[in-house]
Amino acid sequence: MPAVQETIDTVALLDVDKYKYGFSTDIENDMAPKGLSEEVIRFISAKKEEPEWMLQWRLDAYERWKTMEEPNWARVNYPKIDFNDIYYYAAPKNFEDGPKSLDEVDPELLKTYEKLGIPLKEQELLAGVRRHDELSKLDEDPSDNVYASGRVAVDAVFDSVSVVTTFKAELAKSGVIFCSISDAIKEHPELVKKYLATVVPVSDNYYSALNCAVFTDGSFVYIPEGVRCPMELSTYFRINAENTGQFERTLIIAEKGSYVSYLEGCTAPQRDENQLHAAVVELITMEDAEIKYSTVQNWYPGDEDGNGGIYNFVTKRGDCRGDNSKISWTQVETGSAITWKYPSCILRGNGSQGEFYSIAVSNGAQQVDSGTKMLHLGKDTKSRIISKGISAGKSQNTYRGQVSAHKRASDARNFTQCDSLLIGDKCGAHTVPYIEAKNSTAQFEHEATTSKISDDQLFYCMQRGIPEEEAIALIVNGFVKEVIQELPMEFAVEAQKLISISLEGSVG
Amino acid sequence: MKVQNIQNNAAEDALGVSLPTRRVESFHYTDLRSQLGTFASKAERPSEEVAKKLGDGFPRLASNAAVLHFYDGHAFERGEKLPAGVSANTDLPKAMEVDGLDDTIVAINNKISTDGVAISVAKDANVDRPVGLAHTFTGTSGTTASTRYAIDAASSSTSIFIERFMGRSTDAHLSSSVVAMDIGEGAVLNYLIVQQSGLGAEHLGRISVRLAENAKLNLFILNAGGKLVRQEVKVDVAGEGAHVEIKGVNLVGDNAHIDVTTVLDHNVPNTTANELFRNVVAGDGHGVFQGQIKVAQIAQKTDAQMACNTLLLTDDGDFSAKPELEIFADDVLCAHGATVTDIDDDHLFYMRARGIKEKTARGLLIKAFVDEVVEELGVGEEIEEAFIGVIDNWLDTNVS
């Protein structure tokens, strides 16, 4: 069928070699010695000017990590990681004291952000950088309605440090704390102590323990009671330095009745060797609170033969602690050589809700093993899982998800739908759901399908005068639409672009 | 993979076979290492009188069937005449190969099997009478009774087999059955398993099937007994145009753990499969369904569907399902659906509104839910009625 052939050709053309974020920025780095040891952890902690309790916590995590074993149950293959061949800390040198003015910013770094096309390049936001501790012009302009402007506050993390956090002052006016986790440890230790590692325990898994020992930066968000965060919060992660691992830690707490929408984006340069990214993200919602967490993950996927690329071993978990709270994960995964990621929801509060919307696109030699866990503990809890996997090239794409209802989780309700689309006959699509019901009033539904674009669908469109190429576009767009529409506007556009880079090309 | 525990385990020592923990993915929901009892001795061949009595209360499922009898794992000659086209050799067929802990049941069976039979169905034979393979157990505490057979259905033949396990013992005893089936070109094989072991029975079953071109397997599994049951089905769909139909009813009673694990390997283009399981969990029973559909890269145009529906009647029981798809070909249609729920309130209301007592209404709805599978088997009214009888009996005792 020519149309399919065309799609395959287009995919081949737009292969991972065309990774457009593959540049690296030549800036001087301040690095920890290579390898993992107590000294390195002490070094990181000292660099971050952390209090003693934090250092002890890290060392304790390191001790536990040493006793743990690398998990091997996921459908991914990769050579054994030498954890002593990684730099655990790399900071752009010129930034060590924090940028006080735009002139101080390494122009190379500015260029990086420009290439990334993140909102940072906007002059207004950069002005925010310059007046780090002052009120920004926007704050002084009363005509500016923050609720309607649709602006985004950004925390940019470059290798191991948070480079800049914008709109801090403005957010502070509503009582929202949005800063790097390093700053939070220093400035809000009581909050960090109270919540850190309460959702993902230190020894939850191999990579979470590693993260606890060596995490370098990430975002901290605290939304006080009754506050609807006035703007979208966003973090941009970039791994730049060679042989460096990025271990970020994100902690978001939404107090009673609050709401926040958080976006996360990631890119990395094109390198021959593999880089490790092992993040831990913890979300906590109290009564009636809601967190919407969206990710557009576009780490460098490696070349088509599987050389290089990021190993993305991430633990993301949300805890609906309060009644009627809600956590919603939306992810668009197009990058990384290997993805090992299961954003989960612990539905503890009665009436709490968990959602997981995912698009995982794999191409080249990428391996994706991703999915979610919905653990129903409270009464009347609901969860919804929509997962769309598209595999092309020689990639392997696995959905692995668990839905369970605890004995006391009466009237738990789950709906799961995982659809896979295969493009080309060298890739694989796999579905591994675990459905566990321990309560008779639980109502679980699971559906999964795997297919290629059907001839019937194509025929239907073409019969109505839509050219083959556009018909494929239409069908692929339709295939992922349920997830795309869950993304905030700012990301929906980017996500659509990313998918077209990874796959469609001709169809855009 | 590091899965082996170094620690000694009584069950393992008694059998002399390594047992998997839950860390072995295919045994994720059935932890043989901790759940399997300690079985140190093979059950002895019972006397004729004892054997005769054992079968009391288990009426025949098909009046015209030719039944091969096994008592406590030992073959008994009862002078039943096999239908034309079917021949049987009562030597124990050669042991099946074991490939790691996934084949634990085969390994155990190889170790403890006492008797078996190799059955051949002649080319073009159209066997109209069912062949029964009846296993009855005394169920003496700590003993094992195990058999192994090979079934070779030559090309273009049609045959029907009923494998049945019966017992009343509430003492812990182990039974095991491993079957290797080869279904030739264009042959149709109906294989019906009825498991009515005693409440102390631990039963490990495995069927390994290979299908040639245009061959067809109709498999039905009815679990209505036992304490710890694991029935594995492995199908190698190796001939183009082959079709696999698997249907099952798992009735999981109080204290029971019933696991049905199926793996369909589609290794050639243009094959189809359809799986449907209906499960009822009562008391504090644990039900497990693991269904894997694998499609190799060359197996284009595979059409495989799987559904698993469960009625979980109590909060003490649980049900775990893992319907798995592993697909390496792009031009395929594969889907699975799984549901777990209690009886629909609307259905109940509909019946109550018509003056039917709640208890009766619930009973009728459960019965309808599982009977549907049996009614669609297409293996003749007598056998279907007999199966429904087995189901009714179970429902009467287990669902109040």
Image (tube, coloured by chain):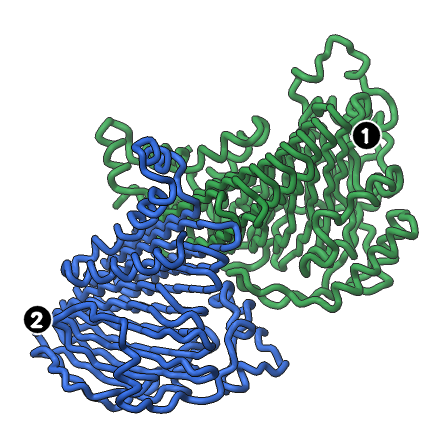
Chain colours: A green, B blue
Q: In whole angstroms, how far apart are the C-alphas of marks 1 and 2?
A: 88 Å
Point out which mark residue B94 bears: none
- Which residue appears at 10% of the width and 72% of the height? B127
Left or right? Give the position of B102 relative to A95.
Answer: left
Left or right? Give the position of B325 relative to A221.
Answer: left
What x and y, as percent, mark residue A461? 27, 31
From what the image shows, is residue B58 above or below residue A163? below
From what the image shows, is residue B325 above or below residue B74? above
Q: Which residue carries the number 2 mark?
A: B126
Amino acid on which disc 1 is placed: Leu
User: Can the viewer see residue A451 in this picture?
Assistant: no
Q: Which residue carries the number 1 mark?
A: A102
What x and y, as percent, mark residue B60? 20, 71
User: Can the viewer see residue B260 in this picture?
Assistant: yes
- Which residue appears at 60% of the width and 39% of the height? A295
What x and y, as percent, mark residue B153? 17, 75
What is the quadrant of residue B63 in the picture?
Answer: bottom left
Residue under disc 1 on the same chain as residue under disc 2? no
Circle 1 packing at 10 Å, graded few (<14), some (14-19), many (20+), is some
From what the image shows, is residue A374 above or below residue B270? above
- Which residue appears at 86% of the width and 38% of the height? A188
Per the image, label 1 sits on a secondary structure element best described as helix
Q: Which residue is at the far top?
A: A143
